[in-house]
Amino acid sequence: MKIIDGKKVSIEVLDEIKSSVDNRVKNNLKIPHLAAILVGNDGPSKTYVNSKIKACERVGFKSSLFKYSDSISENDLIDEIQKINNNDDIDGFIVQLPLPKDINQEKILSQVDPYKDVDGFHPINYGKMALGIDTFLPATPAGIIELIERSKIQTAGKKCLVIGRSQIVGRPISILLSQNKIFGNATVTVAHSRTSNLEELCLESDLIISAIGKPEFIKGDMVKKGSTIIDVGITRVDDSSSHKGYRIAGDVDFNSVSSRVGFITPVPGGVGPMTIAMLLKNTLKACSLSD
Ligand code: NAP
């Protein structure tokens, strides 16, 4: 069994981005600038945004954080997005999800300038992704692809099971892996909460990508020997032995699964760090497009 070290791979990607930034500086080109919009006081959202800002510092990007109270109206938030759309110094920005329940997420995401949509959630970019046209790929699926490619895992002709059909992970990764691309050509099945034969599907899959948010749901007796397991799940589980009072768990029961499979991503330290690295890669791309 080989552990796919997402932390190590993400550092490789960040180092590549840093050297591109250094080259840009040498050539008097613009320094990439990523902005984040944070609405409300959700703890995990604050942590994710702070990690993104920290990663910007590491690679030499400029970053800006726009914080709003959770009482901001949808229209006022749209006005703020338009200001960022019109700010020439900002190359790309993200709206940290989830948004407060009174704000229509789809409506907000469709206000982001597609050329600055480094999360790849604007319908134009999402549509391009589905059509296989070069665009900003959503960061988590892009990170999964990068992990698969850099670990030299073959996907062509393999049976791949994606568990979860969310717009941000399950749906896009299922599309990407089925496309006629080097990293694709897999025979993809998408499972969700209404799937009746999940264990059977798991057992026959060469590659499982799990994005459901159910801690340690996938057990050793559910996976095929020698298969590849990509665990996207991140759930806080109460743990009184940790000074934080919780630990982070993936969807996969690492202890029982890891001894049976060929490759596995750990949680933490698997897909998570790749998501931020790919967001920065998209921001570098957005900046380069406007050279
Ligand atoms: P989500 O919107 O919460 O949706 C969960 C999906 O899992 C849904 O499609 C749901 O089916 C399906 N599901 C739930 N229980 C299931 C079960 N017992 N069997 C089969 N399918 C089941 O998903 P998400 O936003 O993609 O997040 C999923 C997990 O990934 C979460 O833990 C999240 O924190 C994590 N995540 C991690 C990263 C990262 O960077 N590593 C990024 C994003 C998300 P229905 O559609 O039928 O409800």
Image (tube, rainbow, N blue to C red):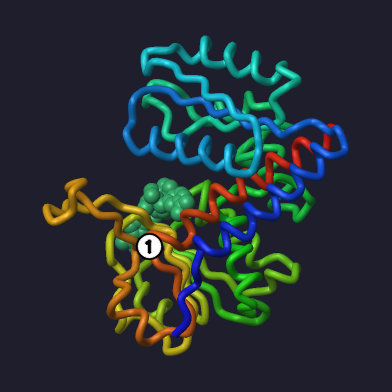
- The residue singled out by tag 1 in the image is 267
Is 18 on the left or on the right of 249, as rendered? Answer: right
Residue 207 visible in this rendered orientation of the protein: yes
Task: Name the spot of residue 201 as percent of width and height, x first.
Answer: 43, 77
Task: Name the spot of residue 85 as percent of width and height, x first.
Answer: 69, 20
Residue 194 visible in this rendered orientation of the protein: no
Disc 1 residue: CB within 8 Å of ligand 1? yes
Q: Residue furthest bottom?
A: 225
For the point 63% across and 63% down, the residue is: 146
- Locate residue 70: give its quadrant: top left
- Disc 1 marks a residue whose amino acid type is Val
For the point 28% across and 77% down, the residue is: 255
Say if 11 sits above or below 42 in the image.
below
Work out whether residue 242 or residue 116 is closer to the camera in this orientation and state it. 242
Work out whether residue 45 or residue 114 is closer to the camera in this orientation and state it. 45
Work out whether residue 226 or residue 25 is closer to the camera in this orientation and state it. 25
Say if 166 sits above or below 110 in the image.
below
Quick one: SS at disc 1? loop
Quarter of the rendering occupied by the C terminus = top right
For the point 81% across and 45% down, the residue is: 23
Quarter of the rendering occupied by the N terminus = bottom left
Task: Name the spot of residue 263 as percent of width and height, x first.
Answer: 48, 79
For the point 64% across and 80% down, the residue is: 154
Work out whether residue 169 or residue 139 is closer to the camera in this orientation and state it. 139
Say if 39 sits above or below 273 in the image.
above
Say if 153 sits above or below 145 in the image.
below
- Locate residue 285: give its quadrant: top right
